[in-house]
Amino acid sequence: MKVRIPWHFVRLMEFSGEPTDWKRGPQPPEARPLGATRDIASFGFDVRYPDMSGLSTPALQRDYDGRPFKVNPWMGVSITSGDLYRPGALAARAIVVRKQKSYPTYFQVASDIDAMEKYVVQSTNPRTGKPARLDFGNSDVYLAFDRSGQVSAIIECSNTEIGRQLCSQAFVLEPHASVFVEVRYGRDMLPKWQDIQRRTGALLLGFRID
């Protein structure tokens, strides 16, 4: 898929088979390894929900810089593609959670989010006496599935009692493109996960050119 990406949607871009020096930028064509392609391996950007505006103007930059810490509409987006893309990564993660193959073990509970299964760590931290799901790294996990039963989204949300509770939503752009997408936002935006996925996917596919 050929793309043309506006400059404000590109941050820390790297290409398949081409090591990048982040201080100097991508290597010039003559310095690239033999056989290297210009397939995008990864990049990231910040975008405001729901208008999906990037940091394209001084006004938007000021809005981003002045955003409240706990509740704000800005999301971080990163993509993985090219030689870093791993088909089946979503399905593998879902199997680990649903079949209780991870440590700590996740158990399914009643979901508070439409169209998603919810899994939480239900044990207790013996040192603090508090639920283990409050420990760093023991996020609540939400899974969504399409009509064929294939996982279509995985969302992991922190339960931190200090600072902003963050969610990380992962999905792929198949069959349109071999791209793994991660979107990070505050837990207050979790009920809008379907619209977030739709708008983010449309934004990325909008970079396509003939």
Image: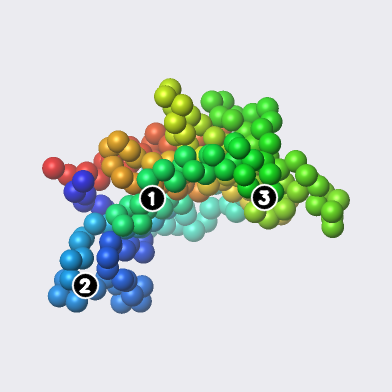
Residue 61: x percent and y percent? 42, 57
Which circle's residue, 2 or 3, is located before the other in the chain?
A: 2
| Residue density around tag 3, few if under 14, some if 14–19, many if 20 or more, within 10 Å | few
At x 65% / y 54%, what residue is drawn?
A: 137
Which circle's residue, 3 or 1, is located before the other in the chain?
A: 1
Tell me the colour scheme of the image.
rainbow
For badge 3, the amino acid type reads: Tyr
Which circle's residue, 1 or 2, is located before the other in the chain?
A: 2
Q: Secondary structure at mark 1?
A: loop
At x 24% / y 57%, what residue is drawn?
A: 39
Name the side, left or right, on which 112 lies relative to 154: right
| Residue density around tag 2, few if under 14, some if 14–19, many if 20 or more, within 10 Å | few
Residue that mark 3 sits on: 103
Residue 16 higher or lower than 124, as above or below: below
The answer for how far apart the CA atoms under marks 3 and 1 are is 23 Å
The answer for how far apart the CA atoms under marks 1 and 2 are is 22 Å
